[in-house]
Amino acid sequence: MKLYTKISLILLIPLFAGLTSCIKEDQYPVVPQIEFAGYGIYSAADGTDSACKITISYTDGDGDIGLTENDILEPYKYNYFLKLMQLVDGQMVEVVLPNDSITFNARIPMLTPTGRNKNIKGEITMNFDLYFNSYLLQSDTIGFEIYLMDRALNKSNIVTTPNITIIK
């Protein structure tokens, strides 16, 4: 019986190693790719819409999405870029911000995985304040244009949300 067990182990270990080495890893381009995944609206107690959450999905072949706490100077100040759009005279136009110190851009923290395989995919959800930004809006129909930038300064594709009707 012991000989049978040893022979089984000798045969099973290489078989198991061979099978696990055949597992194919996902391969993504090193330039981040994003897709619009959805949105949600939060309403305030008075019935007006107070916030919007926007979700995008992403893939990146070298996993270099995200900034450290020390990345504070251009071009690494932001890596999630968002344009607020509104419907004016039948066309979506960018909302003009009152000065250069105001931005809707954001910072995504480091997402680089440990280990040999740096391919990453996932979702990022950002909240956008409608209540404090409502003074900028002439319309009750808004939308967003979004793109990411990785640490190698590769710019992702731009995604556009569908038109979103809000209660101001």
Image (cartoon, rainbow, N blue to C red):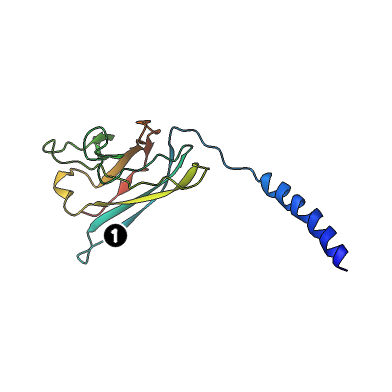
Q: Image quarter for residue 7?
A: bottom right
Residue found at the far front of this picture: 3
97 or 5, nearer to the observer? 5
- Kindly identify the residue that appears in the image at 27 percent across and 36 percent down: 76
State the quadrant of the N terminus: bottom right
Residue found at the far left of this picture: 99
Q: Is residue 149 above or below residue 38?
A: above
Q: In x, y percent, where is residue 29? A: 49, 33
Q: In x, y percent, where is residue 51? A: 26, 55
Determine whether, in the image, residue 35 is placed left or right of residue 3: left
Determine whether, in the image, residue 55 is placed left or right of residue 71: right
Secondary structure at numbered mark 1: strand
36 or 8, nearer to the observer? 8
Q: Is residue 5 above or below residue 161?
A: below
Q: In x, y percent, where is residue 166? A: 27, 52
Total numbered labels placed on residues in the image: 1
Determine whether, in the image, residue 4 is placed left or right of residue 64: right
Amino acid carrying mark 1 in the image: Tyr
30 or 44, nearer to the observer? 30
- Kindly identify the residue that appears in the image at 22 percent across and 33 percent down: 74
- Kindly identify the residue that appears in the image at 35 percent across and 35 percent down: 151
80 or 127, nearer to the observer? 80
Q: In x, y percent, where is residue 20? A: 68, 49
- Kindly identify the residue that appears in the image at 11 percent across and 38 percent down: 98
Q: Is residue 135 above or below residue 45?
A: above
Mark 1 residue crowding within 10 angstroms, few (<14) / some (14–19) / many (20+): some
Check disc 1 and report the residue beneath it.
42
